Each structure stands twice: as C-alpha cells, then as structure tokens.
Amino acid sequence: MRFSLPLAATLALSAVQASPVVKRDGPVTTPKGVNDGVILNYALTLEYLERKFYQDALANFTRNDFVKAGFEDPFYDNLKEIYFDEQTHVQFLSDALTAAKITPTVELKYTFPVTTVMQFVTLSSVLEGVGVSAYLGAAAKIVNKDYLTAAGSILTVEARHTAYIRASLGKSPFPNPFDTSQGFVSPHSIRAFNLKLTNTLQNEVFSLAATYITGGTSPVKLPFMAFPSLTLQCSQYYYEADRSSVTFSGAFKAAQKFGVAKDTPIYAVFFSGLKKLPVQVRITQGNSDYKIDRIPAGVQGQAYVVLSKSSTDFSDEKIIAGPAIIEVYPKGKIPSAPKGKCH
C-alpha cells in the first residue's frame, strides 16, 4: 500500500466557535476557539468516517471474500462488532452534543482507495491507529470531566480495534510502549504559507481525515485546517529504524511555492509514542524531492512524519507539510514475507 496523503480540495471546514459546554476551575490551556463542543464534533467527524468505512466493506465484501484472502472466522464477525462500536460512538457523540444544545455534525461523502480485502484490512489498521492518536491528543483539551471519561472509554476501544487488526495482518499488535498523540497544535497557526487564512487551527489528524472526505455539507464549521500534503515515495522494502532511507516525493518543489529556498534547513520530524525525532533532509532527484538517509532509532510501529523548519519547535508555524503515515519496524526485525508491491 502506498502511504500517500493528498488533501481533499473540497474540504470546507472554516473557523467558527461552538458554544462552550463546561468550564473547569483553574487555568484551561485549550487553544482559542477550541472547546468541548468543538472537540466532540471533531471526534464525531472521525467516527462518521470510520463508520462509513466499515459499512462499505461489509456491503462490498462477503465472509467468503475474507476467508479467501486469509482472514478466517471469526474475523468477519469481529468486523461486524467493530462496525457496531463505530455506530455506537457516532450515536453517543451526537446525543451528547444535542443534549448540550450544540449542533452535531453530519455524515459527509467519503472515498476510500479500497478494491480488495487486503487493501481494506491494511487501511483499517491505519485508520484505527489514527483514531487512537486523535482521541489521545484531544483528551488533554477536554474540560468536562464526564466527557473526558467517555473519550477515554472510546480511546481504549479504538486501541483494541487497532491491536486486533494489526495482529490479523501479522504485525505486532502493540509495537510501541506508548501510543502516539496527534492532537491540537498551536492556536496561532493563521499564517498557512502566506495564504492569509484567519481564525484557523491546523491539525495533523484533520490533515489525515481530509484525505478521504470528498464532499457533503455539514451545519458545523470546525476551526481546523489541513496541512499541505506529504507523500512518501513507495519503497519495495520494509522501513527499519536506524537503517532505512525515506524519500518525500516532490516535497521540495512544493515547498518552493511557499518561499522555501535550497539553503533553508528542513527537518523530517517523526512522531512515535512520546518521541519527536527530527532528521535534517537533503534535496535530491532533480531538485524536486526531499530525502533522509536513515530513519532515526526509536521510531516503531505506526508513526507520523511532518516536514518542519525547526529541529526543536514543531508547532504549526514551523510545519510545512504532512503528516504522512509510515509503518516502521525495529532494526533487524522486519517480516520474513516479501513486502507487497507499490500501487
């Protein structure tokens, strides 16, 4: 599977503020314009996407299709359970917003690059991992303790989904002692490469979700915006920490449009568990691509990578593209089975 994450140009999620739900005693560090109502709608947006993903798969593939692809019983029944979980999460979040007199978002139109069972299961692993990262990142910004408990309850279920799907693919169900947070970032991200966008909050997870949202209109406008896309050049080899190189296709050419010069230091920053690991990139392939020669030690499992102008400050203002998703194995522990072909 090629981990390419282009943006959906039709994503129209401009900034407005939802009504606050509850305030906690003491200082609250939630970014301006982001409150419990926004966070719940943010979660609901992701849950709608996941629900539709599983709904389509159960409609398009039969139990026998999964068995033929190597996913024997009770895998198909467990997928139904996962779909039920996602449906329950959608209903719970929608009801919670309605009870708080906040308009809930609605299901949009989605397109998933899936034509085979294996593609579906592989993308399922990615989406479930993103869900875990999203809830983990959002949890720190939830003010209402009841909502925090509910979000934590959903997070643990999403983590079980991830572990099950990864194990079904022959991957480690728990490759990292810490899950990776992809949460709310700097509240001052209104520059967005001199595009003069105002009152926006760029967000890594929203950049990933935007990949699959292709249309539809929501009554809710969330204050998040996707970063410019970042595409990993497909490799015929598994990625190993402290060994493999990574090429970011067309990344320098794209960055030049936003004022990045050849002598501008740019870093590939890997988010893995609690670690943020930067590596300076170099320009290659006819002044079009960025490349690093070695993934840093410590990256493992499903990780995220962005391009940043800083090796120490990874806030919105410094990020120029991403995130892309990359599956990284510990050095010397790649699977024995050949890697699938690039698509």
Image: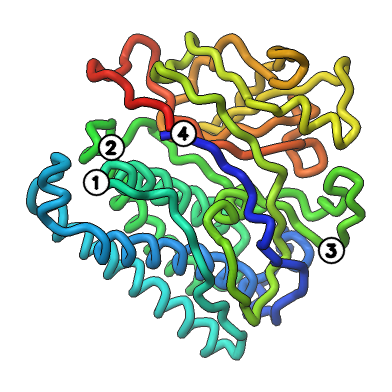
For the N terminus, the quadrant is top left
Q: Identify the mark nearer the N-term, 1 or 2.
A: 1
Residue at mark 4: 2
Foreground disc of the pair 2, 4:
4
Q: Are marks 1 and 2 in contact (CB under 8 Å)?
A: yes
Disc nearer the start of the sequence (1/4): 4
- Which is nearer the N-term, disc 4 or disc 3? 4
Residues at marks 1 and 3, CA–CA distance in whole angstroms: 39 Å
Q: Who is closer to the viewer here, 52 or 303?
A: 52
In the drawing, what numbered circle is on residue 173?
2
Numbered badge on residue 199: 3
Q: Are marks 2 and 3 in contact (CB under 8 Å)?
A: no
Q: Quadrant of residue 79?
A: bottom left
In this view, the residue in front, 25 or 227, is 227
Q: How far apart are the two marked residues, 1 and 2, measured between alpha carbons?
A: 7 Å
The residues bearing labels 4 and 3 have C-alpha atoms spaced at a distance of: 33 Å
Residue beneath the point at 77% across and 68% down: 15
Looking at numbered disc 3 in the image, what kind of residue is underneath it?
Asn
